[in-house]
Image: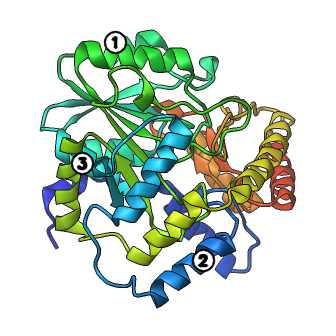
Amino acid sequence: MKFAERMTRLGTESAFEVLAKAKDLEAQGRNIIHLEIGQPDFQTPTNICEAAFRAMKAGYTGYGPAAGLLEFRKAVVEYIAKTRNFEIHPDEVVVTPGAKPIIFFTLLALIEQGDEVIYPNPGFPVYESVINFVRAKAVPLPLREEVGFRFQTEDLVTAISDRTKLLILNSPQNPTGSLLEQEELELIASLANKYDFYVLSDEIYSRIVYDKQHQSIISYPGMKSRTILLDGHSKTYAMTGWRLGYGVAPKSIAEQIVKLMINSNSCTCSFTQIAGIEALSGPQEFVEQMRAEFRKRRDMIAIGLNAIDGISCIEPQGAFYVFPNVSQLPLSCEALADYLLKEAGVALLAGTAFGEFGDGYLRLSYANSLENIEEALERIQAAVAKL
């Protein structure tokens, strides 16, 4: 069958490919520890589930507005004011089935063929995939280990040209766990205003920060009219399967995203949005408890990886990933990831799954129990010792 040429420009997520390989091995009787998938291993809090059930019984089972239920968008307004100290209007909020559509819709709405989009590398692979899909030029912004997997000023300045239309940010960051700091956000804001480009700020991990405070680019001078903020419920409230995300954008951009919703999804599930209101406005102890547990796991996995000869690991500041340097080992990161799956029964990802600047690294998700992480570290150490 001959497919449209545009399909050749879409990539995929290696995490799901590795998961499939791992499942095949499990079907053969192997015991596999899953550190490849970025999914909290916690159950959605009971109060959120009960809110969804009540909403279904109350009739929230039909079509809703393409932009999202007004009551949910109002809850987002209050949440943004509380977490970003920034005022927005419900008309500047668009609700989507998961946060990922905001990436796709933003690029479809703003980017012309030949425009340039700067994106973090290593970074979430969907960024580069969709940039290529819309026939823009993907301009990587290297995140370098020597500066804590943040960008260097000269790299950003060099990446900007008269064709730059959009800069994609992700903080806390997947796959490195790095966090943008005030001076970097101030620089980005000044450059965006000077060179007249937009910013897509992926803040899906904003509540999973350990030792510092998350800051959003949207609150910096001149940035409200230039920022599309992406957030959602998947990571913060362990609601990955509920598919509930949203974008915050200037009204003119939000209106274009609504058009894309009408032409693709019609609307986001109504009873899921009612549950989402409970998540945003209800008790937040679950979020704090989950973050505290992730901190314990972060400490264990970072210390454990640093104890293995040939591996070094920077302690992440947010999200639930580590990105250890394995360049001193005798295998490429791709071969090493495959070897650790087959030899040690540990599923993880090669750094190159996140772009060219991920070469020489692995990504491990510590969204797994302390017991499984401890076992995985022992298996990795034993397997590496055989190389």
Callout 2: few (<14), some (14-19), or many (20+) C-alpha neighbours within 10 Å?
A: some
Is residue 98 visible in this depiction of the protein?
A: no
Percent coordinates x, y for residue 382 in the rendering: 86, 50
Residue 49 bears which disc, if any? 2
Task: Return the residue at label 1.
Answer: 158
Q: Which of 143 and 271 is in front in this view?
A: 271
Q: Which of 164 and 80 is in front in this view?
A: 80
Q: Is disc 1 placed on a helix, strand or loop? A: helix
Percent coordinates x, y for residue 314 in the rendering: 72, 30
Q: Which of 55 and 310 is in front in this view?
A: 55
Percent coordinates x, y for residue 56 in the rendering: 46, 86
In this picture, residue 66 sits left or right of residue 16: left
Q: Residue lying farthest top?
A: 154
Residue at figure coordinates x 18%, y 46% from the top left: 109
- The quadrant the C terminus occupies is top right
The residues tagged by marks 1 and 2 sit, at their Cα atoms, a distance apart of: 48 Å
Instruction: Examine the rendered structure and indicate whether residue 60 appears above or below residue 365.
Output: below
Work out whether mark 1 precedes mark 2 in sequence or the reverse, and give the earlier one: 2
Q: Is disc 3 placed on a helix, strand or loop? A: helix
Q: How is the image coloured?
A: rainbow
Instruction: Examine the rendered structure and indicate whether residue 225 appears above or below residue 21.
Output: above
| Closer to the eye: label 1 or 2 | 2
Residue at figure coordinates x 18%, y 38% from the top left: 111
Task: Return the residue at label 3.
Answer: 254
Residue 258, image quadrant: bottom left
Q: Is disc 2 placed on a helix, strand or loop? A: helix
In this picture, residue 174 sits left or right of residue 25: left
Amino acid type of disc 1? Answer: Thr
Work out whether mark 2 precedes mark 3 in sequence or the reverse, and give the earlier one: 2
Callout 3: few (<14), some (14-19), or many (20+) C-alpha neighbours within 10 Å?
A: many
Callout 1: few (<14), some (14-19), or many (20+) C-alpha neighbours within 10 Å?
A: few
